Amino acid sequence: MRSVHYSDVSAAARALLRLPEEAREAQCAQMMTQADWADRFVGRLGKIHPLWGNGTLGDVACSKGLAAEPSFGNRDYCCCFEIVLRQLRQRLWSAPGTGNLTDQQEK
C-alpha cells in the first residue's frame, strides 16, 4: 500500500460509513489488503489495477462508493475514522522494519 494521507483515511471512513456497523471492521481490512495488492500490481506491471486503482487506500475506497463527508460531530463518521486509523496503526506496527510506511514507498 502506498503512503497513507488524510484524504485516504477520510475516503476509507466514508466508504465504511455506507455499511452497517457490524461490517465495517472486515471491510476496512479488505480495503487495506486490496490497496496492497493494487500497489504490487502497479509495481509489477506498470499500470493501474482495473478494480482497485493505483495502490492508495483512497483509490480502493472510491471503488466502493463514498458517503458524503460529514463533520466530526457525526458519531458514526468518527467511529469509521477511528477504525481506519486503528487498523492502519496495527498494520504499521506489525510490519517488519521500522514500523512506518515511509516516503520511500511513495511513487
Image: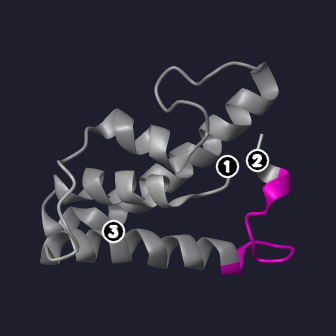
Q: What label does residue 78 carry, if any?
A: none
Does the stretch in magenta take in 90?
A: no
Q: Which residue is mark 1?
A: 2
The residue that appears at 27% across and 64% down in the rendered structure is: 24
**Residue 103 in the figure: left or right of residue 85:** right
> Which amino acid type is marked by label 2?
Glu
Task: Answer with mark 1 or mark 2, whichever residue precedes in sequence.
Answer: 1
Could you tell me if the residues under marks 1 and 2 are in contact, i.e. CB atoms within 8 Å? yes
> Which amino acid type is marked by label 3?
Glu
The residue that appears at 62% across and 22% down in the rendered structure is: 48
Q: Which residue is mark 2?
A: 106
Place of residue 90 in the rendered image (x, y in percent of width and height, measured from the top left): 57, 78
Place of residue 106 in the rendered image (x, y in percent of width and height, measured from the top left): 76, 47
Q: Nearer the viewer, residue 94 or 62?
A: 62
Place of residue 37 in the rendered image (x, y in percent of width and height, measured from the top left): 62, 41
**Quadrant assignment, res 35:** top right
> What is the span of residues highlighted in magenta in the rendered image?
93-104
**Quadrant assignment, res 89:** bottom right
Q: What label does residue 25 carry, if any?
A: 3
Place of residue 41 in the rendered image (x, y in percent of width and height, measured from the top left): 69, 30
Marks 1 and 2 sit apart, C-alpha to C-alpha, by 6 Å
